[in-house]
Every structure is written in C-alpha cells, then in structure tokens.
Image (cartoon, coloured by chain):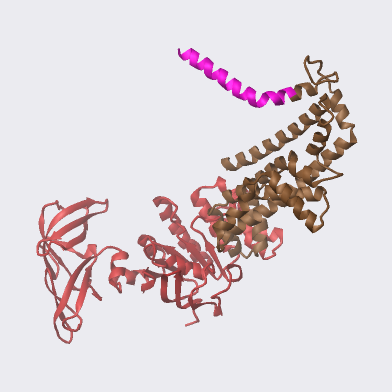
Amino acid sequence: MTAPLVDIDSVSHRFGQQTVLKSVSLKIEPGSYTILLGPSGSGKTTLLSILGGFVTPSEGKVFIRGVDCTSLPPAKRPTTTVFQDYALFPHMSVGSNVGFGLRMQGVDGSTRAARARKALALVGLASSFDKKPHQLSGGQRQRVALARALVIEPAVLLLDEPLGALDLKLRRQMQDELKAIQKRVGTAFIHVTHDQEEAMALADHCVVMNDGRIEDEGPPERVYARPATRFSATFMGESTILAGTVTEASDRTSTVATPVGQVSLPSALPVGSAVGLAIRPEHLVLGAAGGGVRLGSAEVSDVVFQGSFKRVLAVSVEDPSLQFIARLPAWAAVQPGDTVAVSCDTDQIILLMD
Amino acid sequence: MRRIVRIVSWLYALAVYGFIFLPVVVLVLFSLQSTSFPIPPFTGPSLRWYDVVLSDTRLTSALVNSLLVASISSLAAVTLGFLSAWGFARFVLPGSGLLRGLITLPLTVSYLIIGMGLLVLFNWAGVPKSLLAAGIGHVVINLPLCFAIIYSQMGDHQINIERAARDLGAPEWKVLLLITVPVMAPAIFAGFFLSMTFSWDEFVISFLLTRFDTTLPVEIWNLLRSGLNPKTNAVGSLVFAVSIVLVVLFELTLLRRRKA
C-alpha cells in the first residue's frame, strides 16, 4: 500500500466559542472519489475549506503528497476548488476563465489557449471558448468551473456542493458526468454534499459526518448495508430503529427484548446492554408470509405511491410510539387502516451499539 | 373635475422644473447675446462671447487648471476610496464600524470648514497656496464619496471570485488588478465621474487654497466682481456643459451596472 495522497491528522477547528471539527482524521487514496456527507453544521464544508487552504485549523495537520500543507495558502498548494456558486470571473471569456490558472503559472498564450480548449472539450463545452459566463446556463457554468479547476492538474480537486444549485434532473445528469470525468482524468475528487443519493451514486469512499466528527466511512455499499452508528443508519437512507436490551447471551447468539417482542441475533453481546436494531425499508415484510423474525403487527397509516414502489408507514400495535417504514412493490395491495403482521430476516437486521 | 386636476398637476410640474432650470436657461440664452449686456431684449444668437472667452488666456489657463485638478484629484480619491472599501469589505478590523463612520464623515462637514482647516494646516506645515493644495482639498472631499459608492457595491458574491483567483495561484496584487478592479469597474468609474463633477465646479476650497494659478470657478468669481456681461454667461455655460457631460457619464456607468 502506497502512502495516502491526503492525510488529515487529528484536525480540530473552532470558530470563536463554537467547535466545528473535533479531532478528525482521514486518509484519501490517489484516484479516489471521496464524498463528505452530512447535514448542515456537521463540519464537512469546514473540512473542505481546510483542505483548500481557506481556513487554517486550530489543531492538527494536513499532509498532501506527504508535504505538510497545514498553513500553506491556497495558491501554493496542489488543490483547486470548484465553488458552490462556481465563482467564474464575469468579465473574462470562458476561455480566459479556464486559462487563468495557467496564466498565473506563466504559461504562454498559445499553449494556454490550447490546454484551455482541451479542458473545455473534456467537459463537453469546446464551442463555448469565446462566450462570456453570463451567456451560459447553470449546468454549463458548472462545467466551466470544473474545467478551470482541472486544467492546472491539481493533485486533489475539491468540490463544495457542486450540484446544489441545479434542478433535480440536471443534478442526476451532472452526477453521471462528474463520475465519468473523474475516471477519465484520474484526479482524486473530494466532494461535499448533504444529498445521500448523490453520495451513493458517486463515492468510492463515503465519509459520513455529524457534529464535527466522522461517524462512519467506507465504500457506500458497506455504509448503507452495515452502518456503524445510529446516525449513519438514519442519514444514509431510511431505517426503522427498534430500541432493545440484551436479556440472554450464549457463545454465538443473544436475545434482545424489544417493545415488539424477542429478537435473537447471531452475535455474542453483553447481557443488559442497550442496543438499537435498524431495518432498511426494503427488508421489512408486511403480511402473513413473513420472514424469520416476527415484529408484532402494525396498522398502516400512510401509503405513498412512488412509481416503482410504494412507501408505507405503519404504526406498531404493541408500541404506538414506534413507526415502521417499509418499501413494498408497486403492485402490493395495502390500504391505510389495514392491520398487518410485520417481520424480517435475521441477517437483514443492523445491530447498532450505542 | 378630473381634467382640472390634471391641468393643475401639469402646471405644478412646470412650475417646479421652471424654478430649477429657469436660471440655467437664462444663463445659456444670454450667453448667445450679440450686444454687451446680458439683459432683455435678446439680440442673438451669436457666438461672439464664446470667442472672447476662448481667446482670454486667463480663462483658458484656468479651464486647463480646473481639468487637471479635477482629473488628478479624482484619480487619487477613487484609488484611495477603492483601497479602503476593499480593506473594509474583506478584512475584519477592530472598530470597523467606527472607522467606516470616520472615513465618510467629511461628507457632512461644510466645504468652508474643510477649506479653512486645510488652510491652517498647510500654513503651519509650510505648504504654499497652490493648485496642489486645492487638489489635496478635493481629495479630502471626494474620497468619502468614492468610498461610499464603491463600498456599497462590494458584495459578498465577489469574495468567492477573489478566492477562486487565489486558489488558481494568483498573488494578492494580481487578484486586485485582474479580478477585483475589473469586476468593480462600474462603481469605480461612477465614483471617478462624480468626483470630477464635484471638483470641476468646486469654489470655496479652491478660493481659499490657490493664489496665482487658480481654477475656473475662482476665475469666474474674479470676473463677476467687474459686473455682469455676456462673457460671464458664456463661461458659465461652458462650465455647465462639462458638468452635464460628467453627470451623464456617471449615470451611464451606474445604469450599466444595474442592468448587468
């Protein structure tokens, strides 16, 4: 294993009295697409600003390619940022915008133009070289910002909610394109977002942040299927969470008492400890032909048809404070008011220790 | 009834505009007089008095002086105003609000007080009465104006643009020169033209701070002491024409800014 491209070593940051990052450590591999995912105020944007050099952390160090960059200004570090509002230079043509970084490096005019054209071709805007930014649409400006940041061949490209200002359809389209561009140029991308669908679609490595800490990190499939914490189970997709207490334990199995009955799990847990059991909506079974674990019965309170599936909310009969969130096939015949048996398979239960 | 209201409101508008513009109209009209007195009946039109004004070397050199003082002092005022606006907008300074108040304070102080203050100060410092002294006076009165105009247009959305430039490797002076100044150009030009306008027909400070070489308004005042004649009307009309051009330039730059 080679040295990580970016090594964030116990970085903390305070704005006045408020601590926004609490001893965050993170390693980023060359050529990877990393997503920092979290709600607003989780510290993800501050972490990105620290990587870009716009904020110097209160504590900790940042190494890029093994060089200590902690207090290096943005101009001197091998990163470039795509800003949320794109921050294109309004008085310059698209070509001059893209060529700006090369101009600062002292690259001569004709080489600059050639490389700017190449970068614009990469993002599919070769014909817009002589246009002004205000003549472009939002999605096109986004691409110009991307080309401008990529043309100087940074070691790391930082993207601050790059798709936040686009409408949903364009966002999904740009998402695919971002991924394709990243694969083509091979630069490491670090991308901040609060949209978990965006995170799952783009990330090689997904970092879930909350309240200044990293809650969970890993491939998005793993983070979704086996979230490490309660927060990441609820933020990365939806779950029904049952609170329970371990009542019996043997070498291989434990029994957990929950408001909807006993659940036995194939893992050894200390007796008396409080645990959370999370179940993804697509793993909940409503109706008689159920899975291995019975979770009592529930009254359906709401059915939302979403095209390819139905999202069903049901209130537990045994514990009216518990609400099941299930995803059923579009053809499923459920009505609000129905009382149904709830169950799931043992191996689909996500155990949360906290 | 409605008709009467309409007619009255038209008459009222006419009276207001007449009150404002009649003096100027009279001034310009009698500058075209062909006889020696700017009083009715009107005997023109004739450019005779413009000819006299333009062949009067005292007046033409005063006109050149005025243009020099106006352009150089406005350039200085707009440069200093821009730099202070940028400083206040981009950096957190202790007592920022108070300092911003102080920098705009001269706008509220009368020109007479500023002129007298400078006179005393220059006297004490050994700076002779001159066009330079008057120019410095004009910087004092116009800097707050330039600052206020430019500062009001320096929004937060430009912060990211400057950041992007730094991020792409631009040193601070290049950020200012290649990004901030061009982006702020409309406000900078507006400040410059408004300063020009104010400096161009400023009298009190120039009167107090110049001696042998002087500006056009002071020279006109000298002319007026020997009584009214169409020559004063002609030179006044010229001053007015230049002011109009400057104000139109100011409006155009500000308007272009709004449309963008």
Residue A203 location, x and y as percent? 41, 67
Q: Is residue B83 above or below residue A24?
A: above
Q: Is residue A104 magenta?
A: no
Q: Which chain is red?
A: A
- Where on the picture, by quarter, is residue B199? top right
Q: Is residue A182 left or right of residue B78?
A: left
Q: Residue at x 20, y 81 (%)?
A: A267
Q: Give the brown chain's letter.
A: B
- Residue A180, position in %: x, y? 47, 62
Looking at the rendering, the stretch of residues picked out in magenta corresponds to: B1-26
The spot of residue A130 in percent (x, y) is 63, 49
Question: What residue do we see at 83% from left, 32% from top?
Answer: B223
Quadrant into which the N terminus of chain B falls: top left
Which quarter of the figure has residue A175? bottom left
Which of the two residues, A83 or A176, is positioned nearer the viewer here?
Answer: A83
Secondary structure character of the magenta stretch overall: helix
Residue at the image position 11 percent from the left and 52 percent from the top: A337
